[in-house]
Image (tube, coloured by chain):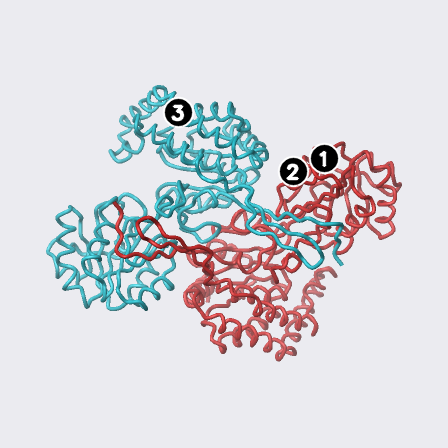
Chain colours: A cyan, B red
Amino acid sequence: MSFRQELEQKGSQAKNAARRLAFLASSVKDHALYAMADSLEKHMTGILAANAQDMEAARKQGLSNALLDRLLLTEDRVRGMADGLRQAAALPDPIGEVPGMWKRPNGLEIGKIRVPLGVIGIIYEARPNVTADAIGLCLKSGNAVLLRGGSEAISSNIAIVRVLTQAAETAGIPTGAIHLIEITDRSAVDYMLKMNQYLDVIIPRGGAGLIRTVVENSTVPVIETGSGVCHTYIDVTANLDMAQAIAFNAKVSRPGVCNSMETLLVHETIAAAFLPSMLSRYHEAGVELRGCDKTRQYHSAVLPATEEDWATEYHDLIVSIKVVASLDEAIDHIDRYSTRHSEAIVTSDYFNARRFQREVDAAAVYVNASTRFTDGCEFGFGAEIGISTQKLHARGPMGLPELTSIKYIIFGDGQIRE
Amino acid sequence: MSFRQELEQKGSQAKNAARRLAFLASSVKDHALYAMADSLEKHMTGILAANAQDMEAARKQGLSNALLDRLLLTEDRVRGMADGLRQAAALPDPIGEVPGMWKRPNGLEIGKIRVPLGVIGIIYEARPNVTADAIGLCLKSGNAVLLRGGSEAISSNIAIVRVLTQAAETAGIPTGAIHLIEITDRSAVDYMLKMNQYLDVIIPRGGAGLIRTVVENSTVPVIETGSGVCHTYIDVTANLDMAQAIAFNAKVSRPGVCNSMETLLVHETIAAAFLPSMLSRYHEAGVELRGCDKTRQYHSAVLPATEEDWATEYHDLIVSIKVVASLDEAIDHIDRYSTRHSEAIVTSDYFNARRFQREVDAAAVYVNASTRFTDGCEFGFGAEIGISTQKLHARGPMGLPELTSIKYIIFGDGQIRE
C-alpha cells in the first residue's frame, strides 16, 4: 500500500468515525477512557519492549541525551499516561452544551450547541507520552484523531496505539476513530498537510522548526502552539524581593518549557538596587547571563547580548537581560520580540499594572506572578493539548472546549423569509 | 514604489495602528463610525463619479450584467453603506468584555478578556459596498484592516477608502488603521497571503474559486466563507403545504445567495403526493428542474440530474431533486455533498427532527424553516462579515464577537511555581 493509500484510507475512516463519535454518550466515552488506561498498564511489558527498540535505534543514531530522555518510557511514565486518560475521563464532557438559545420576532428559536471539530491531526516529535494524551483529549471531546509522531518513537507509538485502539473499540468507540500514520517518511507529513477533505484542524506540537513547516505548508487550518520568548519586566515600584523570586522562578524552575522566561527587563531607576543580587543568584544557579551594556556593569559574568539573543527561545539555563528607561520602552521591546505567549510585570503601581495588561499583546499577561503558570492544569482547565500562540480559534492553554466548534440549531413552525 | 514595498508599508502601519486601536474607547470608535457615515453621504458625487469610471471600463471589458449590477453604486446604495456604518456604531462593543474570571487555590486570579484579532485582511470581488461594511465591522471590533477588492472596482474603492480614512482619522481613529491595496496585479494577493508578520487572519469573500485560491495559498490563518450547497429534506410525516412553502422559499426567494437551497430531497413514501404540485410550482416560477429517475416520473420538464448536479451551487433558478428511501439516505446524501452551510428537514416526527439536527454536520441545521434565514441580521447579530463554513474559530454568520480573540489576564501577589 502506498503512503497515499494509507493516508487516504485512514483519513476517510477517521471522518466516518467522527460522524458517529459526535453524538456518542458521555458514559461510553468515559468508560472507554478508563478501559484504555487499564489496558495501558496491563500491556506495560510490551510497550516498554517496543520503547526499548526505539531507544536502541536512537542511541545508534546518536540522539542527544535530552532527546533520548524525551523518548524514554518507564513504568512510571506509562502509569502517568494512564492517569492522564483517567483525568480526561473525569473532566466534564464539553459536547452538547448549549451556551445560548434565543427567540426571534418571527418565532424561530435559534440555539448554539457545542459540537466536536471532527477529525484532528496532530504532528509531534519523538515523545510517546503525547500519543496517549492526545488520543484521550480528542476522544473525550468527540473528535477522531490522526497522529503523526516523530519517527524515532515509531515502535513505541505503534504499540501504544494498538493497545489503546483495541480497548477503545471494545468499549464502544467507533472503529476508525484513532489512527497513527506508520510511514515515517517525511512525504507523509506533506500529504497530511493537504488533507482538507478529511481533517478539520492540524495541531503541531514541538519546536519552532516543526511549527513553521506546518504553518507554511498546510492548507488545513492550523493552530500554532508553543513557541515562547517570554519576558518579565521589573518596574520602578516593584517589591524587589518579590521581583527576584519571580524572575528566578520564571527562568530556573524548568528552563526547557515554553512558559519559562527568556528575557528580563529592568527599569534603570532600580537597576543598581536590583541587578547585583539578582545576577549573582542566577550565576550561582549556573545560569548563563547575557546582557546589555548597562547590565554588564553589575556583574562580571554577563556576556554581551546580541540582537539575536532578544529573539531567542533558549530552552536552557541562559537569560538575556536589558535595562530600560521606561515602561514604554519595556512594552515596545516586548512588542518587538515576544512570541505572544506569556509576559509579566512586577510592580506596585496600579496604573502601570493596568497599562501593561492592556497594552501587551500575549496569550497570558501577568501582574506580580511567574510566567510559569501558563498551563492548562495551573489555569484550572485540567489537561491541555498545547498552548496556542495565535489569536484565531483558541489562545493560551487549550483544554477540551478548545477542541470543539459550535453549530446553530433552529426550530421553526414553517417560517419562510420575506 | 514596488508592490512589495507598498504591502510591507501598509502591513506595518496597520500593525502599529492595531496596537492603539485595541484599547480605544468605544465612544471614539462609535463617533468615528457616525462621522464616516456622514462623510460618505457628503462625498456622494465624488464616489459616484469614481464608480462611473469603473462601470465604463467594466462595460468595455464585457462584464456580465450580474457582475455589472454588483459593481454599480447608486445614491441609494451609498446611503445603504452609510446606514451600515451607523448600524455597526449602534451595536455593543465586544472589546473589553470579561466572559469569565476565577480564583485558583494559590490565590492567582485569572480572567479572560475579549480583545481584537489585530489586523484583518479581507479579499473580495468587485462589490464596492463590501469595502465600507468591512471597514465598519473591523474598526468597531478594534481591528485594523487591509482590504484587497476586485480590480474592476478599484476607482470606487479608492474613493470610498479615501473618504472613510479621512473621516476616521479626524475622529480619532489611529492613522494607518484602514488600508486598501491599490495594486490590482494578482501578485499582490499572493504576497498578502504570506504576510504572517502583519496579518492575524484573512477572510476571503466571494465565489468558490477565490476561496479555494486563498485556502490553498495562504500561510496566514483563513476563515473560509460562503459556499453553500444547501439541502431541504421532506420527511414522510411532513405537512405538505408547509413543505412546499419552505422548499419554494428556500430556492426562489433569492437564488444568488449562499443560504438558498440547491437540492431538494423527498422521502419516497410521499413523493407522489408532494412532487407533482411542487414541481409544477417551480416550473411556473421559471425554475429549471433536474432530478433523479424517480423524480422525473412526476413532471415532464425534469431533466436528468448528473453526479455533478448534486455537488453544484447553482446561484441560479435551478434545483436538483432526489427521491430517497429513508432519513438515513437523506443524511448520507447531505453528508456527501453538503458544503456544511445550512440544511433543513421538514417533518412532524419528533425523533426524526432530533436525529437530523444531531447528525447533520453544518453551520445551521433547521427543522421546519427555510435555509434562507442563515444570515447575521436574521439571527439577531446585526451586520455580519460573512458566513463561515469551517469549524475553526467561527461557524455560521460572523458578527462582531467573531472578529475578536481573548487574552488571559492574571493578577498575582508574588506567586511562583513549585
| Residue under the image location 53 percent in, 58 percent down | B401
Q: Chain of mark 1?
A: B
Q: Is residue B357 above or below residue B169?
A: above
Q: Chain of mark 2?
A: B
| Residue under the image location 36 percent in, 29 percent down | A153
Number of marks in the rendered image: 3
Q: Nearer the viewer, mark 2 or mark 1?
A: 1
| Residue under the image location 25 percent in, 55 percent down | B414
SS at circle 3: helix
Residues at marks 2 and 3 touching, judged by CB atoms closer than 8 Å: no
Residue type (three-letter) at the residue carrying disc 3: Leu
Q: Quadrant of residue A266?
A: bottom left
Q: Quadrant of residue B276?
A: top right
Q: Residues within 10 Å of mark 2 (few under 14, many from 20)?
A: some
Q: Position of residue A106 (x, y in %)?
A: 71, 57
Q: Chain of mark 3?
A: A
The label on residue A40 is 3
Which residue of the protein is positioned furthest toward the left in this rendering? Answer: A300
| Sequence-first disc among 2 and 1 | 1
* Mark 2 vs mark 3, CA separation in Å: 35 Å
Q: Residues within 10 Å of mark 3 (few under 14, many from 20)?
A: many
The label on residue B335 is 2
Along the line of sight, the residue nearer the viewer: A268 or B302: A268
In this figure, which residue is indicated by the disc labeled 1? B327
Q: Are marks 3 and 1 on the same chain?
A: no
Residue type (three-letter) at the residue carrying disc 2: Asp
Relative horizontal placement of residue A167, taking residue A280 as reference (left or right)? right
Residue type (three-letter) at the residue carrying disc 1: Leu
Q: Position of residue A262 (x, y in %)?
A: 26, 52
Q: Position of residue B266 (x, y in %)?
A: 78, 39
